[in-house]
Structure formats: structure tokens, C-alpha cells
Image (cartoon, helix red, strand yellow):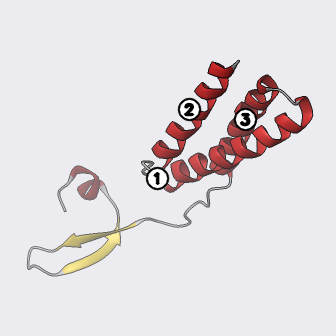
Amino acid sequence: MKRFGVAAVVATLAASLLAGCASSEQQQRAGTGALLGAGAGALVGQAAGRNTKSTVVGAAAGALLGAAVGTATTPQRRGEEMCRYRAPDGRIYTAPCDERYYNGNY
């Protein structure tokens, strides 16, 4: 059981390090939610079962629930996304994004 607890701690540390590498806001919120959920789940699992197995199960359940809540509560942008373009005369202007932006022809 001791190895199981050590593996859980290592997995939690690895998840916390990788959460900082997330690129989008939704991924960052999911990672943060998973970390907070795992901590809370571990506390609840330990209080309920008073053994390592219930602590690990609580941490896993909390991480899943926390990631789901973090993903679901990410605010969505409203309206069109605006991009910056350079005109042939050198001036920079803002307009709704189109294929030029996504193809790199801006």
C-alpha cells in the first residue's frame, strides 16, 4: 500500500507540473480544477475511509470532477474574433479573421 500512496503523490506532482504547460484558457482551467478537485477528494476520501485506498479513490474522483467543472465553466468569447492585418501600403488594421489569417497570409 505504501508504493500505491507514493505513486499517487508522484502522479499528482506530475499533473501539477504539466498543468502549467496548457496552452488555452480552457486547458488551464481544467488542469487547475483537476488539481483542486484531487486535493479536496483526497481529504474527503481520507475522512470517509481512513485508509490509503479511499484517499486515492477520492483523489481520482475529485480530479475527474474538478477537470469537468473547470472545462465547463470556461467563459466563451462572444462575437467575431478580430485579427490584425498589414495592408500592402504598410499600415496595420484590424478586421474579422478569415482564411488569410489561418493560412499565414496576413
Q: Position of residue 64 (x, y in %)?
A: 69, 36
Numbered mark located on residue 24 in the image? 1
Is residue 70 left or right of 91 when viewed as pictured? Answer: right
**Residue drawn 52% across and 48% down?**
27
SS category of the residue bearing label 1: loop
The quarter of the displayed image where residue 48 is located: top right
Residue 77: assigned label: none
State the image coordinates of residue 105 (x, y, percent, origin top left).
Answer: 17, 57
Residue type of the residue flagged with mark 3: Ala
Q: Earlier in the sequence, mark 2 or mark 3?
A: 2
Q: State the residue in front, 41 or 3.
A: 3
Tell me which residue sits at (10%, 79%) in the image: 90
Which dot marks residue 59? 3
Q: CA distance from mark 2 to mark 3?
A: 11 Å
Q: Which residue is mark 2?
A: 11
Q: Amino acid at mark 1?
A: Ser
Q: Residue at x 19, y 63 (%)?
A: 106
Q: Closer to the observer: label 1 or label 3?
A: 3
Q: Secondary structure at mark 2?
A: helix
Instruction: Establish if 104 lies above or below 47.
Output: below
- Lower sequence index among marks 1 and 2: 2
1 vs 2, front mark: 2
Query: Looking at this rendering, what residue extends furthest in the front direction?
Result: 2
